[in-house]
């Protein structure tokens, strides 16, 4: 399939990130995240905050190598954490707005053609989408998934997560495990992730269910969710 328009990826980042915040603002910070069993809602909020901080700095500063030295400190209260998340979420979309997608930028992909701002746009749209789903699972609510974005997510999992994991990535059987050798930010059961790599998903998704999803005629939104 044809990838989505770059501006549409940025719009999805904006919309999915806003929904993520909306859900977690009303969710008990101590609520468990079923899809990442060792994470609380507060952990999930902090994770996406650091992810969006990281990729903002990559887009703005264009480093040749990643540097985590400037990572912000985790706030002490849920309200402060929401404010920091909102800051970095807005900063990410502002940094991406209007930038040519073929501009060179550091990414964790082993494919040199993926070292672009366009790769970041696409990856962060799916990052925001899947964590919005995590937030809704924690809060016991749900909302619609965009079918085109979900279908693109299936293609990204197959083409990028399986096809372009970084050299030295640690692997496991289905579901995929793809974490780069860059410094790890947080490790949770079923969700080992760092800001530079795609999150390792997901203890709550069974091997048999994922394989069934990829070989069936399930809707793309469901297939994308299961594959993660």
Image: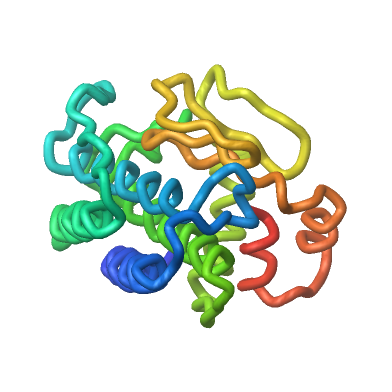
Camera sees residue 100:
no
15 or 188: nearer the viewer: 188
In this orientation, which residue lies closer to the viewer: 25 or 136? 25
Q: Position of residue 36 (x, y in %)?
A: 60, 48
- 20 shown above or below 168: below
- Residue 143 at least partly seen: yes
Left or right: residue 23 versus residue 58 is: right
Q: Nearer the viewer, residue 125 or 7?
A: 125
Q: Does residue 143 appear left or right of residue 120 in this picture?
A: right
At 67% across and 71% down in the image, what residue appears?
Answer: 222
Quadrant in the rendering for residue 200:
top right
Q: Residue at 69% of width from left, 77% of height from top?
A: 219
Residue at the spot x=27%, y=39% of the render? 74
Residue 216 placement (x, y as % from top left): 82, 68
The number of numbered badges drawn on the structure is 0
Could you tell me which residue is drawn at 12 percent across and 35 percent down? 61
Coordinates of residue 106 in the picture (x, y in percent): 29, 32
Colour logic: rainbow
The quadrant in which the N terminus is found is: bottom right
**Quick check: 76 left or right of 157?**
left
Percent position of residue 14, x then y: 28, 68
173, above or below 180, in the image: below
Up the image or down, 194 lies above or below 89; here it is above
Quarter of the image for residue 57 reads top left
Identify the residue at the far bottom of this view: 144
């Amino acid at each position: 399939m044809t990838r989505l328009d770059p501006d549409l990826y940025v719009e999805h980042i904006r919309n999915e990130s806003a929904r993520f915040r909306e859900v977690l603002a009303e969710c008990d910070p101590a609520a468990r995240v079923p899809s990442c069993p060792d994470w609380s809602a507060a952990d999930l909020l902090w994770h996406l905050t650091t992810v969006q901080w990281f990729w903002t700095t990559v887009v703005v500063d264009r480093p040749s190598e990643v540097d985590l030295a400037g990572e912000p400190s985790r706030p002490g209260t849920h309200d402060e954490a929401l404010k920091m998340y909102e800051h970095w979420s807005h900063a990410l979309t502002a940094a991406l707005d209007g930038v040519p997608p073929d501009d060179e930028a550091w990414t964790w992909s082993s494919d040199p053609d993926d070292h672009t701002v366009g790769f970041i746009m696409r990856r962060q749209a799916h990052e925001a989408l899947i964590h919005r789903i995590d937030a809704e699972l924690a809060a016991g609510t749900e909302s619609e998934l965009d079918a085109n974005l979900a279908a693109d997510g299936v293609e990204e999992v197959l083409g990028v997560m399986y096809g372009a994991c970084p050299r030295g990535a640690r692997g496991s059987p289905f579901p995929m495990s793809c974490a780069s050798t860059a410094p790890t930010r947080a490790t949770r059961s079923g969700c080992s992730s760092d800001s530079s790599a795609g999150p390792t998903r997901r203890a709550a998704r069974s091997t048999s269910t994922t394989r069934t999803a990829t070989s069936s005629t399930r809707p793309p939104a469901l297939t994308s969710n299961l594959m993660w």
